[in-house]
Amino acid sequence: MTFKLTRRDALAGAGSLVAAASLSNVALAEAHATHEVLMLNKDPDNSKNKMLFSPKILQINAGDTVKFIAADKGHNSESIKGMIPDGAEKWKGKINKEVEITLDVPGFYGYQCKPHANMGMIGLIVVEGDGKMDNFEAAQGVKHRGKAKKAWKALWEEAEASGLTG
């Protein structure tokens, strides 16, 4: 059997390939990432740093998922009242359990380990997108106690130095 490829068939096939490639790029652009945050008793790089999330600041895109991993026992992750954007869902993970959250609303998300918040076990997620700065002042204005107060001051300074607050 002989197969004859006409110019019309070749152009139609090439057009189909271009269309398929374009659809694949759209699907890839819409794919969302999953980021991991470890809940730790001590920093593996500096044993003087205790009760922490790693990383403590995370920059993601709207629609991405954050998975908090209970690397050490005795920790949870939960959002802090007043430190999430309007319309965003709060979360409260159970002690020693992983928790996965998808963040769709751009803005600043403050979170803590409830048993160790006063020891400074806190973290910040910055979700990029339109309206990111809408809750910045409110999140930054939340009052904290114990070592969390000093930890938040340092975290906001680090976020600013990294260009995340502008």
Image: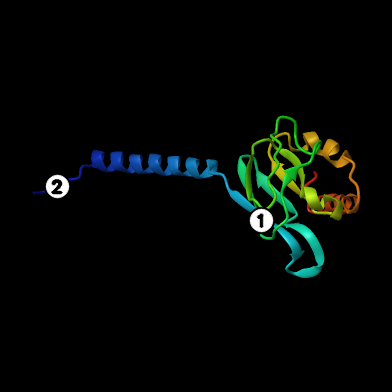
Query: 112 or 62: which is nearer to us?
Result: 112
Give the x, y percent position of residue 19.
39, 39
Instruction: Give x and y (percent) for residue 25.
Output: 48, 44
Name the residue that disc number 1 marks: 70
Can you give x and y, in whole percent of width and height, for residue 151 in the image? 86, 53
Q: Can you give x and y, in whole percent of width and height, for residue 77 in the image? A: 72, 48
Mark 2, mark 1: which one is toward the viewer? 1
Residue drawn 81% across the image and 64% down it: 49
Label 1 sits on a secondary structure element that is: loop
Q: Is residue 41 above or below residue 92?
A: below
Left or right: 11 as drawn, with respect to 92 = left
Q: How is the image coloured?
A: rainbow
Residue placed farthest to the left in the image?
1
Instruction: Please rate how many residues cluster around mark 2, counting C-alpha atoms within 10 Å: few if below 14, some from 14 to 19, many from 20.
Output: few
> Where the C terminus falls, by quadrant?
top right
Q: Determine whether 146 is above or below 7 in the image.
A: below
Q: CA distance from mark 2 to mark 1?
A: 61 Å
Residue shown at 66%/47% (left/top)? 60
Instruction: Tell me the amino acid under the disc marked 1.
Output: Ala
Horizontal placement of 78 versus 151: left or right? left
**Do the residues bearing badges 2 and 1 touch, measured as CB atoms within 8 Å?**
no
Task: Give the residue type that dot 2 points to.
Answer: Phe
Q: Please name the residue that numbered disc 2 is placed on.
A: 3
Q: Residue furthest top?
A: 87
Label 1: few (<14), some (14–19) or many (≥20) C-alpha neighbours in 10 Å: many
Who's the residue at 83% across and 39% down the image?
A: 139
Q: Quadrant of residue 129?
A: top right
Q: Looking at this view, is 127 or 89 the one in front?
A: 89
38, 73: nearer the viewer: 73
N-term-proximal mark, 2 vs 1: 2
**SS label for mark 2:** loop
Q: Residue at x 63, y 50 (%)?
A: 98
